[in-house]
Image (cartoon, grey):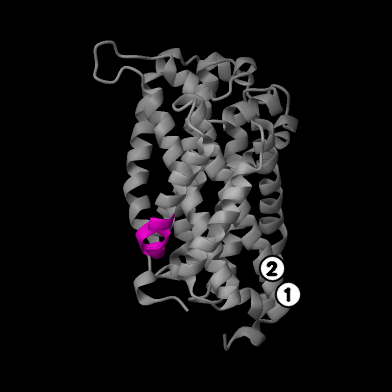
Amino acid sequence: MIRPNDRITTPQAAVILANILLGVGILTLPRYLADTMKTPDGWITVILGGILAFAFGLIMVRLSQRFPGKTFFEYSQIIAGKWMGKLLNLVLIVYFVLFAGFEVRDMSEIINYLFLEKTPKEFTILVFMCVAVYLTAGGINAIARLFEFILPISILIIITSYSLSLRLFELENLRPVLGMGIGPIFKGLPETWRAFAGIETMLFVTAYMSRPEKAGKALLAGVGISVFIYLVTLIVVLGGIPFEQVATLTWPAISIVRSYEITGFFLERYESLLIVIRLIQVFTGFVMYHYIAALGLSITLKKTYNRYIYIVLPVIFMIAMYPKSINQVKALGDVVSGIFLGIIALVAPILLIITVLRKKSYVQN
C-alpha cells in the first residue's frame, strides 16, 4: 500500500510525466522524422502522435483509477491472477531495467562525444548511478520535488535558445504542407512514438496521487507540455534548415542553436545550455525507471524496497555497457521501443477490458 508521505499532487504528477517525455527525443526527433518522412511535415506527425499518446495514456489512467492506492504491480495480480500477474510484472520490470540502461548509456555517449572525450564511459555511468541512488532512496516525493525544480528551468532555456535562432527561420522551408499526401505522416508515426515513451509511467504515478480522480488532467498537462516543446523544436529546426539537411545532422536542434552567438556576452554559445538541459531530462527518465524497477521487484517479491535500489544497479550497468558502438545503442533503443508499443497497445487495454467485463469481481479490491 502507498504510505501517506508518498503522496504527490496533480501538478507534480504532470511535471513527472513531462520531464520523462522531454528526455527522449528533443535533440534527435527532427532528424528521425526528416529521414523517415522525406517531407517537412514532421510537426503534423508530432500533433497526431501526441493525441494518440494521450488516448493510450488515458486507458492506463482509467485502469489505475479502478484500483486506488495500488500500482500496476499490485493490481495486475488481482486482474490476471497471482502467477500471470507476476509474469506481467516481470515483463515490465525487464522493460524498465532495459530502458534505464539505455538512458544512462545515452547520457554517457553525449558527454563523451561533446565534453569528456577521453573519460571512460564506465566512469560517467557510475557517477549518474550514484546520484540516482541517492534520489530514489527518498521515494517518489523526493523525485517529484526535484522534477518540479527542473522543468521550468528546462522550458525557459529551451524556448530562449530557440528564440535566438529565429533569424534563420524561413516559412518556405515548411512548405508545401502535405505536399506528398498523408502517407509520410503515418510513416513517421513509429518514430514519433519513441518520443512519447514514458507515458506508461502513469500506470504507477496515478497510485501515488493524493487526488487520483484528477490523473486525467495530469496526463493532459504532461503530454501537452511535451507536445508543445516537440512542436516548437520541429518548427524551429525545419524552418531554419531544409529537411534534406536535417536528415543528415546528428543533433539538428543543437545545430540550429549553434548558428547564433552573442559576442562579448558572458555566454556566447547557447548550445551548451541546451545539451545540459537534454542530459538533465534524460537523467529524470533514468531516475524514474530505476525507481519503478526497484519498486516492482519489492512488490512482486514482497521484500523491502530499499534493498532493490542497489540490487538492480549492476544489471542496469551491464545493460548500459553491453552495446559496443553507437549503432548497437540505437538497436537497444529499438528493442525498448518495441516493448513499449506492446505495453501500451496490448497489456493496458486488455487488462482494462477484463476489469470492465468482470467489474463485480473487483469491487472489494
Residue that mark 2 sits on: 88
Q: Kindly give the residue lying farthest to the bottom in the view shown.
A: 364
Specify whether residue 271 is painted magenta: no
Q: Answer whether labels 2 and 1 touch (C-beta < 8 Å).
A: yes
Q: Residue at x 46, y 50 (%)?
A: 129
- Residue 337 lies, with reference to residue 143, above or below; the image says above
Q: Using a 10 Å C-alpha cutoff, classify the residue at mark 2 as few (fewer than 14 neighbours), some (14 to 19) or many (20 or more).
A: some
Image quadrant holding the C terminus, namely: bottom right
Q: Position of residue 348 (x, y in %)?
A: 66, 64
Q: Which residue is mark 1?
A: 84
**Element marked by disc 2:** helix
User: Horizontal and vertical percent for residue 3?
Assistant: 40, 76
- Specify whether 321 is left or right of 217: right
At a point 57% along the width and 60% down the height, the residue shown is 58
- The segment highlighted magenta reads 133-143
Answer yes or no: is residue 170 visible. yes
Residue 197 seen in this snapshot: no
Q: Which picture quadrant has residue 105?
A: top right
Q: Which mark is residue 107?
A: none
Number of numbered discs visible in the structure rendering? 2
Q: Residue at x 69, y 21 (%)?
A: 179
Could you classify mark 1 by the number of other residues whose Cα lies within 10 Å: few (under 14), some (14-19), or many (20 or more)? some
